[in-house]
Image: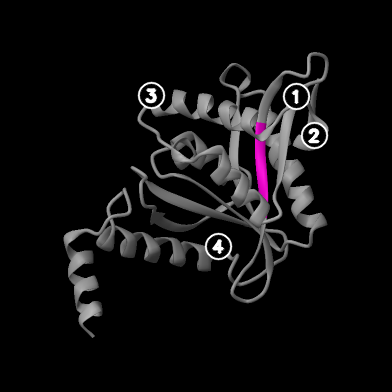
Amino acid sequence: MVQIKELSETKYTLKDIHEFINDVYEKRADAGIHFQALSNSTETIEHRIKDNHGIVFVAVDDHTQALLGTGTILFHTDERNIPYAGFILAAVRPDVQGQGIGNLLRRRREECAKEHGCHYVISTTASNAKSSIQYHLKNGSRKYGFTSYKNSDYYSISFRKDFVGSFQGSSLYCFVRYHLTKIKTKLLFREDGSFTKFGSFCFDIIKKK
């Protein structure tokens, strides 16, 4: 049996969770898929969670209490003052992947998001993480944005899943927004967040104005 608990209800610390995530992500890095969490310190993650009133959930074995997976939820408000949730730092131990643990963690975080009045969820993954992209699409999320971050080595895809119907969460809006941000990002930025030649040219023009 697998139990989903808040981190505070277990013997584990945020440092334990960060080490667990690093271990899982490093195995994916060997396959050419890198994630920003690998370059973040535990302190940076802790501040981000506290600043956004986040909650860390963990999946543990009912008998041994061994750590099987984790997922964190952050709480935000968008430009229209609508509350939404951000799902970050999701990982499942490689030897138990495919057993539904990731789904249990996601469902618990979705329940938590609804309890806090969130209208939708935003989550991200690397653009070359094919299994992760398929996972997002299968759980009802839509591709919503495309960007790159400084000190990363990949483009990132953001996904949106709505609990409350809205035009911004419609398939048409998400489709158009995703492709427009993809065109803009690839024109202006490289995978690591630095400017392309065209991006530098545009930035220089803006600076001179």
Label 3 near label 4: C-beta < 8 Å?
Answer: no
Q: If the image is split into quadrants, where does the N terminus sit?
A: top right
Mark earlier in primary sequence (3, 1): 3
Q: Where is residue 163 in the image (x, y as percent from the top left)?
A: 72, 59
The stretch drawn in magenta includes residue 5: no
Find the magenta span and give its range. Answer: 70-74
Kindly report the distance in space between the C-alpha atoms of the residues bearing marks 4 and 2. Answer: 33 Å
- Rendering coords of residue 84 (x, y %): 67, 61
Q: Which of 72 and 133 is in front in this view?
A: 72
Query: Mark 4–mark 2 contact, CB under 8 Å?
Result: no
**Disc 1 packing (10 Å; few <14; some 14–19; many ≥20):** many
Sequence-earlier tag: 1 or 4: 1
Kind of residue indicated by mark 3? Asp
Q: As shown in the figure, which amino acid type bears the numbered disc 2?
A: Lys
Q: Which residue in the protein does label 1 denote?
A: 60
Q: Which residue is drawn at 72% across and 27% down?
A: 12
How far is disc 2 from disc 1 in space, using C-alphas?
Answer: 8 Å
Picture quadrant where residue 186 is located: bottom left
Name the disc covering residue 5, or none: 2
Mark 1 residue type: Val
Please give the residue where the numbered disc 3 appears in the rendered image. 30
Query: Are discs 1 and 4 less than 8 Å apart at CB?
Result: no
Q: Position of residue 102 (x, y in %)?
A: 65, 33
Instruction: Report the amino acid beneath label 4.
Output: Ser
Q: Main secondary structure of the magenta part?
A: strand
